Amino acid sequence: MRAGQRRGSFYALVEDDLEELTRRLQDVGRGAHPTFAAASAHLFGSPGKLLRPTLVFLSSRFGPGTGSRMIVDLAVSLELVHTASLVHDDIVDRAEVRRNVPTVNAVWSDDIALIVGDYLFAKAYALAAVLPKPEVIAMVAQTVFALCDGELTEVAGPSAMPTEAQYLERIELKTASLYAACCQGAALLADADPEHVAALGAYGTNIGLAFQITDDVLDLVGEEDDLGKEVGRDLAEGMPTLPMIYAVERDGERTSLAARIVAADKDPAEVRDLIAAIRASGGVQRAQERARRSRDEAVTALERLPAPPEREALRAIADFVVSRDR
């Protein structure tokens, strides 16, 4: 059975494109420095969900320019941007495992992981630079700027509980901007109608928000074997997420919960105690409702598109994003 058939029905329409993307990713390190070649083989040896390139390929079907090599180039470029950002995030977070696989910094070192991330960004830019539409090239660059802004907001900000609006602004930069680029950039390259390009951009942004909120919920309620990483990592590092923000809001005038959440380097017992308190507060359920609201807004954006099978596949992705367990 082919990889896409195992993953889910919404991949079926773009299975051949995903096979080509996987082959291209596995060749990223070919002819490069041996350490980079080994690290890239480590990163791309077992593809993840491949949601972002799937969004690229599905979104490109709404214009007459679908099926061209430049669509694959965009998908590879944006997947390299995503992977590079994860490699750098793992350094910042001191993470040792991702998707049940040791991180680059755990296998080699922080210094090597930093350079591998830079190398992946350079590869992404090289692919984007030859795309025929300057606005798409600029979109790739702007996406990297947004990712960096979101990450800096996260790691360089004060140790304080953000508001819901501040949190949503951060994840729109750090996560949703890449989803929007996948959808909008592909539609632009495929010469889709401007109204359809805008609709796909709105869809991508809302899918990205729903995805990140769901990730933050799973960090508090998921199973480590399913997630492929340590549960409660954000909480352990003092990084507030939406369920935590809602829990503190329910806490009212008391500030002890907020102070405990934003404190860094908690011991495992404190993390477990806080997870229990956040779950009991209803913060998890409220965050899930907020993720579903973003999902609904994404689905509403799809109503502005024609109704080929690709639109139904995008709808299925919207439902998957908020119902997954990993």
Image (cartoon, grey):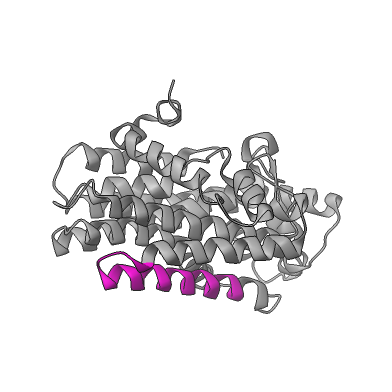
Q: Position of residue 16 (x, y in %)?
A: 33, 35
> Furthest residue to the top?
1
The location of residue 273, given as percent across then percent down, is 79, 50
The residue lying at 23 percent from left, 43 percent from top is: 311
Which image quadrant for residue 111? Answer: bottom right
Q: Residue at image x 50%, y 49%?
A: 288
Q: In this view, does 146 lie above or below 87?
A: below
Majority secondary structure of the magenta segment? helix
**Which residue is drawn at the image coordinates 67% and 39% (left, top)?**
100
Q: Where is residue 235 in the image (x, y as percent from the top left)?
A: 71, 58
Answer whether residue 239 is visible to the viewer in this image: no
The answer, for residue 67, to whether it is visible in the render is yes
Residue 160, horizontal then vertical, whole percent: 68, 75
- 27 vs 238, left or right, is left
Q: Nearer the viewer, residue 169 or 242?
A: 169
Of residues 9 and 315, the one drawn nearer to the viewer in this rendering: 9
The quadrant of the rendering that contains the N terminus is: top left
* Magenta residue span: 129-153
| Vertical relation: 18 (above or below) 152 | above
Q: Per the image, is 312 magenta?
A: no
Is 114 in front, or is 259? 114
Q: In this view, does 97 lie to the left or right of 268?
A: left
* Along the line of sight, the residue nearer the viewer: 87 or 77: 77
The quadrant of the picture occupied by the C terminus is top right
Which of the 4 quarters of the picture holds residue 87? bottom right
Q: In this view, does 198 lie to the left or right of 14?
A: left
Residue found at x 56% / y 51%: 29
